[in-house]
Image (cartoon, rainbow, N blue to C red):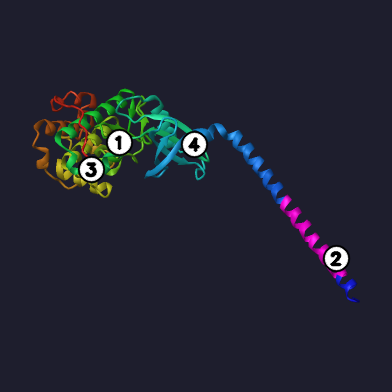
Amino acid sequence: SLLAPKHRRKQKKRLKINSSIFLWRAKSVLSTYSNSLFHSVMLLKYTLEEIPNMQRVGAYDRVDKIGEGTYGVVYKAKDIRNQKNVALKRIRLDSETEGIPSTAMREISLLRDLKHHSIVELFDVITSDNSIYMVFEYLDMDLKKMLDRYKGSFTPMLVKSYMHQMLDAIAYCHLNRILHRDLKPQNLLIDREGHIKLADFGLARSINLPIRIYTHEVVTLWYRAPEILLGTKFYCVGVDTWSLGCIFAEMILKRPLFPGDSEIDQLFKIFRQMGTPDESKWPGVSHLTDYKQSFPYWEAQPLPNEMQHDLDAHTLFCELMHYDPTRRLAPSSAMMHPYFDNVCLVPPEF
């Protein structure tokens, strides 16, 4: 046919075009593969260089998020080496312009040295992915959650057991010249065997001599001692003792004793129950920065009925809650109070 040579020429041209496309695509695929291979090799090199840290982080399988605060997130995790539960407190560093938050550094520094059966144990500190992971022993829940969910579990013997353990932990801190400064139910962790442990030392401070002026921005409002609310320039171990007294009452009452919604409301709630302080009740109170002679005057009121059923519990509370910080019963002495004569470990019901 006369058309055959022309048709064959078109076929050859089409084959050349298709071959060119194939070669272009093949080069593109090879180029992509080679880039991918290069990146894979670089990633492998990075992974190998970082393997010590990656292994340590990878030793813990995160199970669930159990809490979140200003400086980090806390996860329940499992140590794959021994299948034990741990708590991972993750603190991100990428938003910090000054490096590691001071609260994290303070907590790490103090907990490395504090070894006590009623203080949560810090197992390890890991740095990875612009974060610090603090690895703690795991306990089932905090005291706040238990108070919210299992009010009926707070029998007199359980309250006594918890209070004795808390006093033991704080007495140990004070013996080692450390103020916790943030005692509240959220920072007390419990397990099913009946143990309660002190946690979160982010606001804790070592006590130095001479005593320095410390910040007033410590202790959650409901558990804050009146000397801090009144602007004292110096405070010491009595601030922790007051907080323990408030927690003691909360476990008995199953509700907060002084739930103020501002500093002045917090003060007035304390005054309404305990009476407005003056120089006869608290020598030197009138010289505190925020004390006002114009404060309303209230007479002291009897404690709620629930706190009067046990005379020893009532007297212990009163001795922990003196207005004058120097008169508050020291935790080490409080442990010897008759209230604790029959103390024992009590597993909670939850």
Number of numbered discs visible in the structure rendering: 4
Distance between mark 3 and mark 1 Cα atoms:
12 Å
The disc label shown at residue 147, or none? 3
x and y, in percent, of residue 265 in the image: 23, 49
What's under tag 3, amino acid-wise? Answer: Leu
Are the residues at dot 2 and dot 3 in contact (C-beta closer than 8 Å)?
no
| Residue at x-position 40% and y-position 45% | 70
x and y, in percent, of residue 73 in the image: 41, 43
Kindly report the secondary structure that dominates the magenta region of the rendered protein: helix
| Residue at x-position 18% and y-position 34% | 158
Is 156 or 281 nearer to us in this picture?
A: 156
Distance between mark 4 and mark 2 Cα atoms:
59 Å
Q: Quadrant of the N terminus?
A: bottom right
Does residue 55 appear anywhere in the picture? Answer: yes
Q: Is residue 330 magenta?
A: no
Looking at the rendered structure, the secondary structure element under dot 4 is helix
Q: Which residue is denoted by mark 2 in the rendering?
A: 12
What's under tag 2, amino acid-wise? Answer: Lys
